[in-house]
Amino acid sequence: MKKLEILIRNAKNHFNQIQLLSVVKATCVVLVAVIFLVCGKKDLVR
């Protein structure tokens, strides 16, 4: 019974890490897109 609890806890921690990574990746993609848009607009203004 205790082993099962540990397994479930480990699985939850692993899932949380995956979620965190995907959130970080999504944030990075958005930041890069915003930077490209800003740079592109600056170039267009010139």
Image: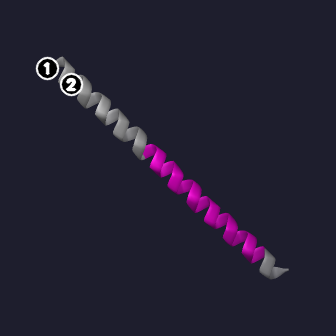
| Applied colour scheme | one colour
- Provide residue 29's location: percent of width, then percent of height: 41, 43
Task: Assess disc 1: are there few (<14), some (14-19) or many (≥20) residues with their C-alpha within 10 Å of its C-alpha.
Answer: few
Q: Is residue 43 above or below residue 1?
A: above
Task: Assign a secondary structure to mark 1.
Answer: loop
Identify the disc placed on residue 34.
Answer: none
Residue to which mark 1 is pinned: 46
Q: Which of 9 and 22 is in front in this view?
A: 22
Task: Report the magenta residues as a range.
Answer: 5-27
Q: Is residue 44 left or right of residue 34?
A: left
Discs 1, 2 touching: Cβ within 8 Å: yes
Q: In this view, does 23 lie above or below 43?
A: below
Identified by mark 1, the residue type is: Arg
Residue at 29%, 34% (x, y): give it: 36
- Provide residue 42's location: percent of width, then percent of height: 21, 24
Q: On the image, which quarter does residue 3 sit in?
A: bottom right
Residue at 36%, 36% (x, y): give it: 33
Task: Assign a secondary structure to mark 2.
Answer: helix
Residue to which mark 2 is pinned: 42
